[in-house]
Image: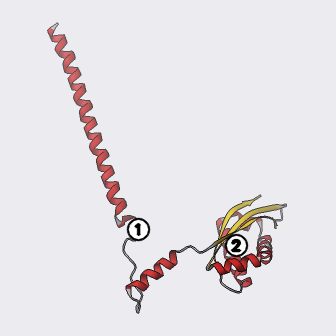
């Protein structure tokens, strides 16, 4: 009977040792992965640019930083209400429902766009209406439409310009 108790106690203690060993190995791995993630995310390994850009020749260090900041600034934006347009297709009738947001260079350009909103909406509707279902179905066609709209709308404006166009709603059916 004494031997039976020793065997069961030995099995219990060896099981406990296994749990402690696996638990400590797991803890060490967890701490290691966390430390590696911290150091990798704070370093330049993922392409982050922590260092300032070099200034162009003839510019001081201030000029280089100002131009870098100016490139990152978002201009004033104006939402244009959604519109529905028939689009060309040989197989049947298709529609595009879209909403657009315009990013402009100055607040004065927003004033001009508001005054010329009928012309702006007309230009958008005509440009989109000349597209086919196939052209608007893929990413390349949408990017091409965006470039065409920027060009066409900037022809209408007399002061300022549209920097970017964002499709905030785009459904082709």
Q: Quadrant of residue 103?
A: bottom right
Q: Position of residue 62 (x, y in %)?
A: 40, 84
Q: Position of residue 142 (x, y in %)?
A: 68, 68
Residue extending farthest to the top is 1
Q: Quadrant of residue 140?
A: bottom right
Q: Residue at x 34, y 56 (%)?
A: 38
Locate the C terminus and report the quarter of the image it occupies: bottom right
Which one is closest to the eye, mark 1 or mark 2? 1
Q: Report the residue marked by disc 2.
A: 145
- Residue nearest the observer in this picture, 79 or 30: 79
Residue extending farthest to the bottom is 58
Q: Residue at x 28, y 41 (%)?
A: 27
Q: Secondary structure at mark 1?
A: loop
Q: Quadrant of residue 54?
A: bottom left
Q: Report the residue marked by disc 1.
A: 48
Above or below, 75 against 56 in this view is above
- Residue nearest the observer in this picture, 55 or 14: 55
Q: Position of residue 8 (x, y in %)?
A: 22, 16
Is residue 85 left or right of 155 when viewed as pictured? right
Is residue 39 left or right of 96 when viewed as pictured? left
Is residue 159 left or right of 86 when viewed as pictured? left
Query: Reading the chain from its start, which is encountered first: label 1 or label 2?
Result: 1
Above or below, 8 against 37 in this view is above
């Amino acid at each position: 009977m004494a031997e039976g108790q020793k065997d069961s106690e030995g099995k219990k203690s060896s099981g406990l040792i296994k749990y402690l060993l696996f638990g400590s190995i797991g803890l060490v791995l967890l701490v290691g992965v966390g430390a590696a993630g911290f150091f990798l995310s704070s370093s330049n390994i993922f392409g982050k640019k922590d260092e300032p850009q070099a200034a162009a020749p003839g510019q001081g260090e201030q000029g280089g930083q100002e131009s870098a900041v100016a490139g990152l600034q978002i201009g004033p934006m104006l939402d244009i209400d959604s519109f529905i347009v028939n689009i060309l297709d040989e197989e049947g009738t298709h529609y595009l429902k879209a909403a657009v947001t315009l990013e402009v260079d100055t607040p004065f350009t927003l004033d001009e766009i508001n005054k010329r909103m009928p012309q702006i909406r007309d230009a958008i509707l005509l440009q989109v209406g000349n597209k086919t279902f196939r052209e608007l179905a893929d990413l390349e066609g949408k990017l091409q439409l965006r470039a065409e709209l920027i060009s066409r709308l900037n022809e209408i404006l007399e002061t300022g310009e549209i920097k970017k166009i964002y499709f905030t709603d785009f459904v082709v059916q």
